[in-house]
Image: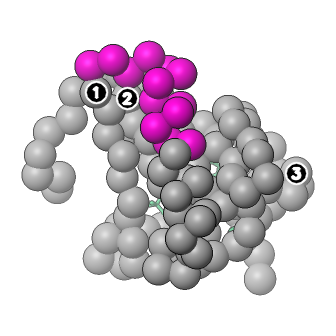
Amino acid sequence: MECVFCNIVQGKSPATVEWEDEKVIAIRDTNPQAPIHLLIMPKEHFPSIDNVPNDILLAMLETAKALATREGFSNGYRIVINNGPDGGQTVYHAHVHLLGGRPFGWPPG
Ligand code: 5GP
Ligand code: ZN
């Protein structure tokens, strides 16, 4: 099945890669919702966060934190996981959003 993020992982589609290791890859979101908006995802295809093994889940969060430090979000940042239709998930290859460079409100819409 065609998956936009698998195509990026496999180098078939272009992306701005900000981090890559054996488990995860981090790219810039093409429709950024903040001055910095990165997507951290497993290299392996899992449709949603519900399917991701714990070690990869941990790697995704660790990568998000490390990138937040690297980006210099000293005043804070937002990590988001949209899960399923009600969660607003649109790409069914599990990913974590890292957003920074502006303040965020709560609760979300
Ligand atoms: P979701 O709503 O599934 O949590 O978020 C999917 C995100 O992927 C959206 O923020 C959207 O802008 C981003 N996105 C969709 N297609 C592409 C793409 O081809 N490349 C990149 N870099 N981001 C994408
Ligand atoms: Zn995929």
Amino acid under label 3?
Gly
Kindly identify the residue that appears in the image at 26 percent across and 19 percent down. 75
Name the residue that disc number 3 marks.
11
Q: Which disc is residue 100 wearing?
A: 2
- The image quadrant that residue 104 belongs to is top left
Do the numbered discs 1 and 2 sit on residues whose CB atoms are within 8 Å?
yes
**Magenta range:** 63-75
Name the residue that disc number 1 marks.
76
N-terminal label among 3 and 1: 3
N-terminal label among 1 and 2: 1
Distance from Cα at disc 1 to Cα at disc 2: 7 Å
Amino acid under label 2?
Gly
**Residue 17 pos. (x, y %):** 72, 36
Q: Looking at the image, can residue 37 be seen?
A: no
Which secondary structure type mostly characterizes the magenta part of the structure?
A: helix
Q: Looking at the image, can residue 97 be seen?
A: yes
Do the numbered discs 2 and 3 sit on residues whose CB atoms are within 8 Å?
no
Indicate the secondary structure of the residue bearing disc 2: strand
Choose mark 1 or mark 2, whichever is in front.
1
- The image quadrant that residue 2 belongs to is bottom right
Distance from Cα at disc 2 to Cα at disc 3: 26 Å
Asked if the stretch drawn in magenta spans residue 73, the answer is yes
| Quarter the C terminus occupies | bottom left
N-terminal label among 2 and 3: 3
Distance from Cα at disc 3 to Cα at disc 1: 32 Å
| Quarter the N terminus occupies | bottom right
Q: Nearer the viewer, residue 107 or 32?
A: 107
Q: Is residue 29 above or below residue 49?
A: above
Amino acid under label 1?
Gly
